[in-house]
Amino acid sequence: MYRLLVWGALLLCCNLCDVRAQTEIFRNAGFEAPLGPDNWYCSGCTGEQYGGDKVEGAVSMRATQRRATWAGPAYDLAYGSDVISDRTYDFQIYVQLASGGDVKHPVKVTVRIEFSDGETFHRQLALLSDVSQTDGWQQIAATLTVPVFDKPVTSLHLYVSGPPSWIDLLVDRSSLTESGPGIVDTFAADTELLSNPGFESSLDPWECRGCTGVQYTTDCYGGASCMLAQERRADWAGPSQYLVWGTTVKAGQNYQSSIQVKLLDGGDTKYLIRAKLNFEFSDGRPDANQQVAANWISAQDGWKLLAGDYTIPALQDYGDAVSSVRFYLQGPPGEIRFLVDDASFKEFVSPTADWRAEADARIEQIRKRDVKLRVNTPNAHGITVEVAQTRSHFPFGAMVNTNLIPSNSLYNDYVFNNFEWAVIGNHLKWKMTERNEGQLTFDRAEAALSLLESRGIPVRGHNVFWGIPTHVPTWLHAYSGSELEQKCWKRVDDVVGRFAGRLVHWDVNNEMLHGNYFVERTGNPQIRYDMFQKVKEKDPGAKLFLNDYGAINSGAFTQAYVQQAEEFLANGAPVDGMGVQGHFKSRPDPVLVKSRLDLLATAGLPMWITEMTVAEQDELERAVGYEDATRVIFSHPAVEGLILWSSVGSPTFGDPLTAIAGGDNFELNEAGRRWRQLVHTDWRTNPVPATRTTTSAGQEFDFRGF
């Protein structure tokens, strides 16, 4: 991850050199001249030139007395002269927080567009999710393409905002220049499908189903107003808007959505808030409700983002039978009031048509390196060097089933011939190892681990806890409060203490985005973070992971998972990585997978794909699905390992829809052959002669390898 950040910074610097050589659009871009309405000024705050700290020149700009989080340095661009439709621009600015110590806050750059009919559109241009005063100056850079609007634009307002109002903002070295053909913006501004997404002109066409919706101006995320949902009759009640089926919303297309939410009641209790699509059908079938985004939010969290993506089912499933489609929110109990603002629902536009070539280029860059072997001897002329890689540096592994290992020799051979890492599927889980309180059974896990250790296979620990009620031991439901906490700490002693030093990873509390059992039963939100601390104390050498699903296989929980990781780090939990489950229900879209991985990487933690499956009835489709997913995952610089789950499907065990091997002999099918070709041939440094160079000291041999 560190190498990625350094490389990215260098790339931005190179772009910056190109940008600044072109015509600068910003007036007073360096803040050296007096501030004013014809250049940089302060929106909702007091702006002044500041000589105490700057990036370059004599002064920077300081924004003080900020009235809200949205207040900050601002610039009004002239649409049609400063910026022109259908042209691409490079933007950058340096930002520093003037107070707050090492507490992290978001800093974002937003563009507000106002139209002649009074409609206002807000679009986030760039975001630094975690910035503190101690970080010093931070660069924000982005590329934007100005869309072609279907109505007159009256103003285009760019502003910097984000941290709490009591924190002063410093900015310096801004730039806006027209660029050459740029990367197509994945979230193209002209594809917004919601009307009145900022709740500014009125609440139309929004409605509050099962509740009363009112326009609210006291505390909004962006702009002057938002929507308050109150007098809600049930947890399903909330803001809602109809979309147009068959023209703007179509079968088989992927859409990305986001909305800002703030709860006004409920204290520190977290509730699962969901954004969904409701489909009604003309052929009499029941409504379909599909989740597009979700997050756990409490009233103490302030404004929180729900963001995700969803692929509309294919034409043969929905098609002409859909009579209406509606975007809506639901989640907290009826007595909880909440605010919504800055909604968005857009068609996903693929940023590249040749994802495979770009993935291969990234693999060449980040997974290989140049090697020079020097043989210093006067008699080196007869030496030749041939290179052959015998083991992958990048972990490629699989879940192993303790019903088959070590007792089934054919299964053992399948594992050792194809994988170099492993995770024990079930027999380290609490419910499996302590069905009756106090009666611990680790015999199957111990036998499997001993064999894997003897073959040099590193093993992940899965899992210490599982926060979904159906996956905790039945007898545990009798406990609550402090008694349950003590049972949890005994569990750490029993399983982590027993295998300390033998397992390289632990998934500490599985699938917390989908279950909050231990917090709800103990009444202690801190227990989530304490679990990581207790496991780290018991096994300091193991790396500790969050582990969850819905982040790359559907996109419904991608943003929520990023925020969860940030929350755990902010509360001092010793989290070493994000375990990302990838259970694809059909052949995955590699461009979508890459987009979701990019978002997950913003949490700043290494990622492991801990449970990957591709379910397809057609074996060839499954093979392509595994190959595409594996390629894009291996090409991502923030991913440090990949584990297959349910990789075998035999007459007596496994899921044939996800298998890469089948039959009682565990023979590789087409998906398995594709996997093996990639992992053991294409991405291995196979026997290759090195290039020889004669030097005064002897011979040098050069090669490039994985």
Image (cartoon, rainbow, N blue to C red):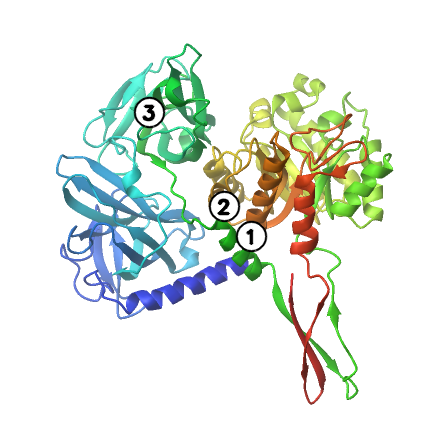
Rendered location of residue 127, percent (x, y): 37, 48
Real-space CA distance between mark 3 and mark 1, rounded to the nearest whole angstrom: 36 Å
> Which sits earlier in the primary sequence, circle 1 or circle 2?
2
Dot placed on the residue nearer the N-terminal end, 3 or 2: 3
How far is mark 3 from mark 2, CA to CA?
Answer: 28 Å
Tell me residue 233's x, y (percent): 36, 12
- Name the foreground residue: 299 vs 514: 514
Describe residue 699's horizontal placement relative to residue 366 as left or right.
right
Residue 606 visible, this orientation? no
State the residue at coordinates (23%, 66%): 23
Residue type, label 2: Lys
Identity of the residue drawn at 58% across and 39% down: 625
Q: Which mark is residue 635?
A: 1
Residue 495 x %, y %:
75, 35
Q: Looking at the image, can residue 407 be seen? A: yes
The numbered disc on residue 594 is 2
